[in-house]
Amino acid sequence: MENPNLQFLLENWLPEATIEDMQAKMDSGELTSKELVLLYLNRIADYDKNGPCINSILEVNPDVLHQAAALDAERKETGARGPLHGIPVLLKDNIDTHDKMHTSAGSLALEHSYAQEDSHVAKQLRKAGAVLLGKTNMTEWANFMADNMPTGYSSRGGQVLNPYGPQKFIVGGSSSGSGAAIAANFAAVAVGTETSGSILNPSGQNSLVGIKPTVGLISRRGIIPISHTQDTAGPMARTVKDAVYLLQALAGRDERDPITLTNNTTTDFTSLFDKNGLQHAKLGVPRDGTFYESLSDEKREIFEQTLSKLKQLGAELIEIDLPSSNADWGYDVLTYEFKTGVNAYLSQLHSSVKVRSLGQLIAFNKHHLERTLKYGQAVLLESEETSGTLTEAEYIQALEHDQYMATQQGIDYALNKFAIQALIFPHDHGSDLAARAGYPSITVPAGYTTEGEPFGVTFTGTAYSESTLIPFAYAYEQATKVRKSPRLERDSKA
């Protein structure tokens, strides 16, 4: 970087800078949004495309410097719109933006596809004054393509690496690029999406705060779908505050997404930062083996230390049982809903896109199999075998089963029976339960193994309980502050 002042900021200030830090410098005139974008672009050049080659960024917005300059001018004329004014944000590659960036879900079949309008998420970000920096790589089709595809791999973008151990630790997914990019400090915050664990898992694996909101808090319109009953977008950030600032901007009703009309929340989430937020909290700890069986002894110990810390911070911990722990879970709901959702999405793309249905996607992959089918497409084939009408008895029965077991025999059962406010899980191990219920979760960094692999803890509640979970997550984060930056070497070749 030629500018010595920016070089100093790049090396000494930008790593771990928060949204509030950035706003303070832009308000004082020490830094502009355009310069902030340049700082992040230099980070991307040094570490994403060189050095360890994290490979988290699929493309940079060609208009990003112009957008930032326009927001700088607005700040001078009328002041900042809010916390995200001029802040660079990355979006997962399954979120539509009506601009010069593509939206492909990591698939070569859609590598030239431009969305015909903004997703509601993109509209909310532009309204808040955020700068759309670029699109992040992801597990192809949000990990709904093949049985053995590694997290973070896409035929369009290749493999995303975990900044904490580029060839050692899994990056997590399917919001892999969003997680790795924010951990490596390629933007202030990122938007991920989750159907089951796809925000929480990469957040935990990359020592981030991830918020998987209630289905309905954020509109799904303009996001390449898997399941209309479980899909949602959500924030991924290095701190609880930054994640909540992004959540506040994304939340809102959308007449074109009916589930958002169940959202009667009027709480300003940014007013909930309370360092004493765990005092008198009542948290349930599910002790069923399914949530712990894959934990190593070392990770189990980190979780036990977390529980001890929660007690020190004033929380009452109650061991609970969940009837749904013995439920016969399957993925029938996703298999049936994917075909319906993806056919609708593909059919509405610009006429220049030749893949217009799931069947045509499968045919495209077969025709380009050397580039597209490194791990096969068994999941796509299984979904294509369904009718696409959602009339099958197997689907209807699975949908009812999942929703009943996840709520009335799962999360709501525990909250009501044990008079608790939330559940606490190691890492992302309760994500599937919350996903089937459509309920919110927040994961927060909890520690690292001796090898340096990140480990998180997750708070989960009932529908629209984000205002309960945020103080818990913030209080725990502020009392522990365990997160540390990954050690990236500019000239390393991982």
Image (tube, helix red, strand yellow):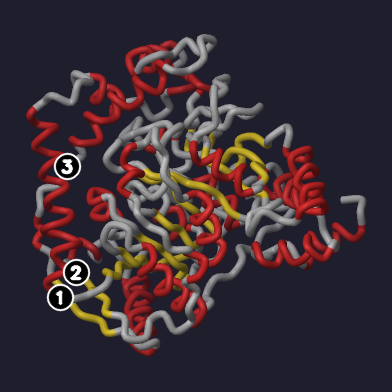
Q: Indicate the position of residue 105 as horizontal and vertical percent values.
A: 47, 31
Residue 291 in view in this figure: yes
Residue depicted at x 33% and y 67%: 426
Residue drawn at 73 percent across, 34 percent down = 63
SS at circle 1 = loop
Residue at left offset 74%, top offset 40%: 67
Q: Which residue is mark 2?
A: 415
The residue under label 3 is 330
CB contact under 8 Å: marks 2 and 1: yes
Q: Horizontal and vertical percent for residue 214?
A: 34, 53
- Mark 3 or mark 1: which comes first in sequence? 3
Callout 3 amino acid:
Gly
Q: Which mark identifies residue 472?
A: none
Q: Which residue is more in the foreground, 217 or 19?
A: 217
Q: Which residue is mark 1?
A: 418
Q: CA distance from mark 2 to mark 1?
A: 6 Å
User: SS class of the residue under badge 3?
Assistant: loop
